[in-house]
Image (tube, grey):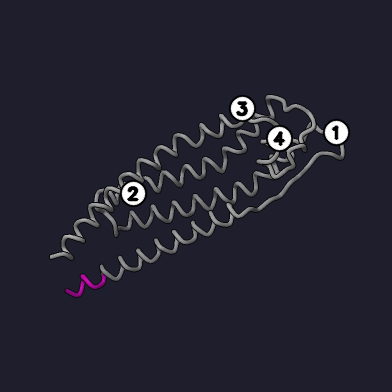
Amino acid sequence: MSKLVNSVFESYSMQRTSAWLARACLALVIILPLLVLAYWLVADSSMLAVRANLLPSAIQKPLQDWQRVVGALLTLIPVVLMVRGLWEARMCFAQFAAGHVFTAQAVQRLRSFAAWISASSLGSILINPLLSALLTLNNAPNTRHLAIGIGTDHILSLLFATMVWVMASVIAQGQALAEENSSFV
C-alpha cells in the first residue's frame, strides 16, 4: 500500500514540478533577450570589455551608438539559440506535466534542447572575438584587441547538453524495448 501511495505522490509531484519548470522556461524565453538589450543600453565600457574577455581598461574611447547596437545584436545570437532550446525544454516539461513522459516526442524535445544549448555555447565562443574587435575598433592603432576565450561556463554548458542528449537516447532505447516487449504479449 505504501508503494502505491509513494508512486502516486511521486507522479503528482513530478507533474507539478514539470508544470512549474515549463512556466520558468517560458519566463526565461521572454526575459533573457530583454535583459541582454537592457545590459547593452546601460553597461559602461569597462563592463562590456570584461564581457568580451578584455581588461576593463581595454576600451580607450567612448563607444558609439552603432557599436552598442551591433554588440547587442551579436550578443543576442547565442541568447536566441539558448531561448530556442528553452522553448523545447518548456514543451517537454509541458508534456511531462500532462503525464506523457516516455514518448518519442519527449525524446525529440530533449535532444532538440541539447542541440540548441550546444549551439548557444559554441556561438558564444565564436561571438566573443567579434565583440572584442568591435569594442576596441575606435582605439588607436596597435591597441585594438582580438580576444579569444573558452570558459568553464562554455565547457559546463556543453557537458550538460551532452548529458541531456545521452539521457534522451536512454529513454529512446527504453521506449523501443518496451514497444518490442509489448508486441510479444
Q: CA distance from mark 2 to mark 4?
A: 39 Å
When the figure is inspected, residue 86 is found, relative to residue 34, above or below; the finding is below
- The answer to which of marks 2 and 4 sits earlier in the sequence is 4
Q: Which mark is residue 93?
A: 2
- Which residue lies at the image location 74% right of the left edge and 42% below the top edge? 55
Q: Percent position (x, y) of residue 52? A: 68, 42
Q: Percent position (x, y) of residue 63? A: 72, 28
- Within-10-Å neighbours for mark 1: few <14, some 14–19, many 20+: few
Q: Is residue 43 left or right of residue 111?
A: right
- Which residue lies at the image location 44% right of the left edge and 51% below the top edge? 113
- The answer to which of marks 2 and 3 sits earlier in the sequence is 3
- Which residue lies at the image location 39% right of the left edge and 61% below the top edge? 168
- Within-10-Å neighbours for mark 2: few <14, some 14–19, many 20+: many
Extreme residue toward the top, this view: 65
Could you tell me the amino acid type at mark 1?
A: Ala
Label 4: which residue? 46
Could you tell me the amino acid type at mark 3?
A: Val
- The answer to which of marks 1 and 3 sits earlier in the sequence is 3
- The answer to which of marks 2 and 1 sits earlier in the sequence is 2
Q: Which mark is residue 140?
A: 1
Q: Which mark is residue 42?
A: 3
- Within-10-Å neighbours for mark 4: few <14, some 14–19, many 20+: some
What stretch of residues is rendered in magenta? 180-185
Q: Nearer the viewer, mark 1 or mark 4?
A: 4
Q: CA distance from mark 3 to mark 4?
A: 12 Å
When the figure is inspected, residue 139 is found, relative to residue 97, above or below; the finding is above
